Image: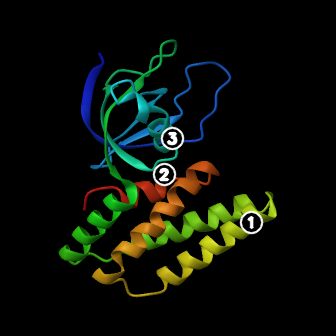
Amino acid sequence: MGSTDTTGVFHVYDNGRRCIVAPCYQYTVRSLDGTEHLASGLDVSALEPAARDRAREELYDGRWLARGTIATGGEPQPRTGRDFRVTELVERIDTAAARLLRQRLERGDHLSDQLKALTMTAEAIAHRAASRSESEQARARQLRAEVAHAANRQVTAADVDALAALFGKVLPLAVESHAGAEPIAATWLTKP
């Protein structure tokens, strides 16, 4: 099966994969319908030069939805890799999460899956921080307490922005600490 290009809006983040031999498919590129691809690099050359370093860093941490193109179909290329070519930073993840949560609430959906994923991810971050510096442990404990408080409430439309902001803090920390960003990204940044 040959390779084709898929263009759209994707959530991109470092998936924690590290390799001895290049290329290493260390980026997860997930569409809003939940389709997932792997990329070995981020090509941000289509962005304004002044924005490229910041974009690369914030995409690495999973902070943006980005419009771009990735080769799909066929097998990942063992020698040349497969880049995700970013053409635009579309929306910050906390803004996207708030929009998607509102859609879910309007449909009458319960947010139990999102709250469960948020709680599990905060627990994983705290577990990972246990062997790190005291300041990282304190940050993880504070985050876990914020998540526990939010998860033990009935979520209403008035809570969406605060909950999405909390998600916007948790996901990059999950990526940074390799605490498993996949479940939270899949439940929060997929169209209802």
Judging by the rendered image, the residue that carries numbered circle 2 is 182
Q: Is residue 133 above or below residue 1?
A: below
Horizontal and vertical percent for residue 77? 45, 17
Report the residue at 53% width, 83% height from top.
Answer: 149
Q: Is residue 143 left or right of residue 138?
A: left
| Three-letter amino acid code at the position of disc 1 | Gln
Q: Residues within 10 Å of mark 3 (few under 14, many from 20)?
A: many
Q: Residues within 10 Å of mark 2 (few under 14, many from 20)?
A: some
Q: Nearer the viewer, residue 128 or 94?
A: 94
Q: Nearer the viewer, residue 71 or 98?
A: 98
Q: Is residue 39 above or below residue 112?
A: above
Judging by the rendered image, the residue that carries numbered circle 3 is 60
Report the residue at 52% width, 29% height from top.
Answer: 25
Which is more N-terminal, label 1 or label 3?
Answer: 3
Q: CA distance from mark 2 to mark 1?
A: 22 Å
Q: CA distance from mark 3 to mark 1?
A: 23 Å
Secondary structure at numbered mark 2: helix
Which is more N-terminal, label 2 or label 3?
Answer: 3
Q: Is residue 12 left or right of residue 127?
A: left
Judging by the rendered image, the residue that carries numbered circle 1 is 137
Q: Are marks 3 and 1 in contact (CB under 8 Å)?
A: no
* Picture quadrant where residue 173 is located: bottom right
